[in-house]
Amino acid sequence: MNRPLVLLVCCAALLAPFALSQSADAPAGPEMGRLARALEGDWNTVEVVQHGKPVASGQGRRGASRVRLTGGGTALVSEGHSVGSVGGDLRWFITIWWEPASSRYRFLTCFRTAKDSGCELRGTGHWEKDDFVNDYEETIHGRPVKMQDRWTEITPRSHTLTALQDSGGGVMTPYVVSHDTRQD
């Protein structure tokens, strides 16, 4: 057999799994592509506001997350863990997908803290210019409260995630603020 041909066949065999995995997790559409470009990667996270109050430097939760496309590019999955003297231990698993019928992103969120754990469908997401926003409601002290997760200042190296809640009269107040920076 011709040596260049053998080399070509061997290279193709070695690279085939990589080509398949890249195409299998390529975004399933432009909506998932935009979301993946904004959030996919390995991130370090630091919380600077907890329960609506700034936390002292080094006291908020610190941790890491991995965000990746999965399911043939149909879902973006975020898995992470952070811990701090303010806020305690938090683990999460979040899945976001595009729902064509409603022209919205949907969220499945799973959180575990020292006191609680569980999963729920949590809101619908959309883009507001360069910000990615998830609107949802939570029951707090027996009444429904409008909530929002807002990813802002999105760059290839960082972004800010702010959890906001309606503090009355439609005024959204930051409840938790995290700054995420890409791991090298």
Image (cartoon, rainbow, N blue to C red):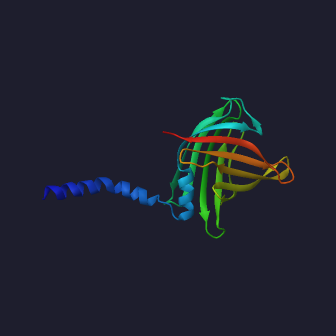
**Place of residue 42 in the rendered image (x, y in percent of width and height, measured from the top left):** 52, 43
**Place of residue 139 in the rendered image (x, y in percent of width and height, measured from the top left):** 80, 51
Position of residue 130 in the picture relative to residue 116 (left or right): left
Q: Residue at x 47, y 58 (%)?
A: 25
Q: Nearer the viewer, residue 58 or 136?
A: 58
Position of residue 15 in the picture relative to residue 92 (left or right): left
- What is the residue that sits farthest to the left in this orientation? 1
- What is the residue that sits farthest to the bottom in this orientation? 101
In this view, 96 is above or below 92: below
Q: Residue at x 83, y 48 (%)?
A: 167
**Place of residue 55 in the rendered image (x, y in percent of width and height, measured from the top left):** 72, 32
Position of residue 148 in the picture relative to residue 21 (left or right): right
Numbered label tally:
0
**Place of residue 154 in the rendered image (x, y in percent of width and height, measured from the top left):** 60, 49
Quarter occupied by residue 178: top right
Quarter occupied by residue 49: top right
In this view, 139 is above or below 126: above
Which image quadrant: the N terminus? bottom left
